[in-house]
Image (cartoon, helix red, strand yellow):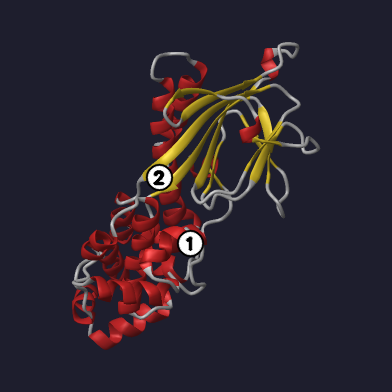
Amino acid sequence: MNASVSDPISELLMGMRLRGASYSKLLFSPPFGVSFPPSEGAQFHFVASGQAILKLADSAPAPISSGDAILLPGGREHAIVSNANVRARPLESFLTVALCEDICTLDAHDAEVCRSKDVLIFTARMDFEMASLHPLIELMPDVLRVSSLVDRQPEIRPLLEAMDREMQSERAGTASILARLADVLAALVVRGWIECDCGDATGWVSALRDERLGRVLSAVHRDPGHNWTLSEMAGLMGSSRSVFAERFAVATGYTPLRYVTAVRMRLAMQWIVRDRMPIELAARRLGYQSHAAFSRAYKRFAGHAPGQARHLNNSHVPERAL
């Protein structure tokens, strides 16, 4: 892919952040099994030493070994076990020790087992600041293996090596450094999948990778509160309004203005429910001049008024919502 086509992708990923994440350093001796419940955020695992198996429902067990890192973008329920026949225990059932806020260790090694067989794993739950990029998460596979990207993204290898060194050390600040490295690796995995692994992508990703349409998408996601008009978006693409509207709808499945509204409402859901932002402030940031106009748009999108969102926890999003 040439550099010009990747520009919209780079612009969108510049807005990707990881927030409210929790990190754990896990030490096990075989046989062991640990299960991770489904989560709204992504799950990241790096195996610093030893051998293990990743298990997901409806998927064949997948071996993971020392130096492997995997990302589960959709946060599916899964387990990491020493043997496919081992029954996994929930992560929360193990005794952990907090190192600092959001970072803990779990030492479940068996003193009677040779330490060379221990399995050392760094794991993270990540809340992507990508509410407006929800289509991206839905299109990703259940598991992204970092090793599959190393040849095409050589910058990944030194990050994995740095994680390995930090995992094996007991130096001050190790946990915090591991957390930051995991954040960067996750972002690189997402970018690598968009640029390389999604192949003959159609729909939203195809539009993102299209130089002219991608320019419009990145502008909307960068500034969703702007007073977007069909004429302005068509101008960004460099075409007439009718040609732009037709091409946009074919690529994304949405009219341009409906797409803008959906992006805004996804952000509103995140800000109001998770960030506890006042509704009036969210409305202003998203370009609405009145609380009433914002509430009408929100209710059409979510099926309930924004004032009810926190009570409902916004768990339901319309099937055809962006």
Q: Position of residue 176 (x, y in %)?
A: 40, 26
The residue under the point 39% across, 38% down is 184
Quarter of the image containing the N terminus?
Answer: bottom left
Q: Position of residue 112 (x, y in %)?
A: 75, 11
The residue under the point 78% across, 35% down is 86
Q: Is residue 76 left or right of residue 84?
A: left
Q: Is residue 81 left or right of residue 66?
A: right
Quarter of the image containing the C terminus?
Answer: bottom left
Res 210 seen here: no
Q: Position of residue 241 (x, y in %)?
A: 24, 85
Dot label at residue 287: none
Which element carries disc 2, helix, strand or loop? Answer: helix
Q: Nearer the viewer, mark 2 or mark 1?
A: 1
Which element carries disc 1, helix, strand or loop? Answer: helix
Q: Which residue lies under the disc numbered 1?
A: 312
User: Taking 94 as reference, is 216 above or below it?
Assistant: below
The residue under the point 42% across, 55% down is 195
